[in-house]
Amino acid sequence: MKNTNPKLKIMVILTIIILGFITILVIVNKPISETVNENTKNKSLNIKGQPTLGELNAPVTIVEFGDFKCPACKEWGEIILPQLEKDYIDTGKIKFSYINVMFHGEESKLTSLAAESVFKNFPNEYWDFHKNLFKMKHTETVTSEKILELAKENSNIDIDMLKIDIEQQTKNKEVIIDSELVKKHNIQQTPTIFINDIIITEPFNYENLKKVIENELKEVN
Ligand code: CA
């Protein structure tokens, strides 16, 4: 019997070699993409000790890097945050944390010190106070007196204690922790919003936020 056609033999060998290369490429590519994911995970935002709204074991985390002196943050807190609360925070799907940014110098620092004090001493009053701090017009100069006036709207806050904490910068350590996070995550503008580890380029586009959230929720299910 005659042997198989040599041309056919070469074709078969070539096909096997090509298939082998493709297989190697697929195998080589896989660990690379996994490594990228690992790197992203390593840069996870540490929200330990930060005020957090919602259930602590909610599967998705949203973090705002915000400044009480920033008009866009005020707007985001008045327009977008209530929608997130209704759709995702109140339903236990996401938790929301806020980290202080001090792009407006001394005025940002005063409000941050006050916010950290209320969070530490009267945690149940924190989010109301947080919203009150944003009531200040960004054109008016922030002073301790103005902050204390706003704090009086929350009858459970001890105003004398808050006054001491602001004057003596009792919560400066917490403010420094926030500043270090700002540096670590290279925050350039406020509000900067993260959904898990994803930085959101259009924080006012609610439909887009929803898409990212839904996608992240799918990942954990
Ligand atoms: Ca903080």
Image (cartoon, rainbow, N blue to C red):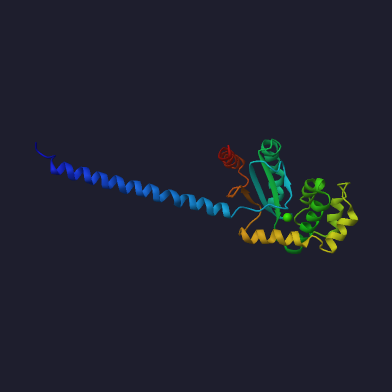
Camera-side residue of 112 and 135: 112
Camera-side residue of 10 and 74: 10
Residue 196: x percent and y percent? 61, 47
Task: Give the tally of numbered discs.
Answer: 0
Q: Residue at x 78, y 57 (%)?
A: 111
Describe residue 5's horizontal placement relative to residue 35 as left or right.
Answer: left
Whether residue 183 is visible, yes or no, is: yes
Residue 136: x percent and y percent? 79, 52
- Outermost residue on the front side: it is 1
**Quadrant the N terminus occupies:** top left
- Outermost residue on the right side: it is 160
Which of the 4 quarters of the picture holds residue 171?
A: bottom right
Ligand 1, seen in the image, is in the quarter at bottom right
Q: Residue at x 76, y 62 (%)?
A: 173
- Compared to residue 105, the image places residue 213 above or below, namely above
Residue 126: x percent and y percent? 79, 48
Camera-side residue of 13 and 122: 13
Describe residue 26's horizontal placement relative to residue 187 as left or right.
Answer: left
Describe residue 11's horizontal placement relative to residue 149 as left or right.
Answer: left
- Outermost residue on the left side: it is 1
Whether residue 140 is visible, yes or no, is: no
**Quadrant the C terminus occupies:** top right
Residue 183: x percent and y percent? 64, 61
Q: Residue at x 89, y 52 (%)?
A: 158
Q: Residue at x 53, y 54 (%)?
A: 39
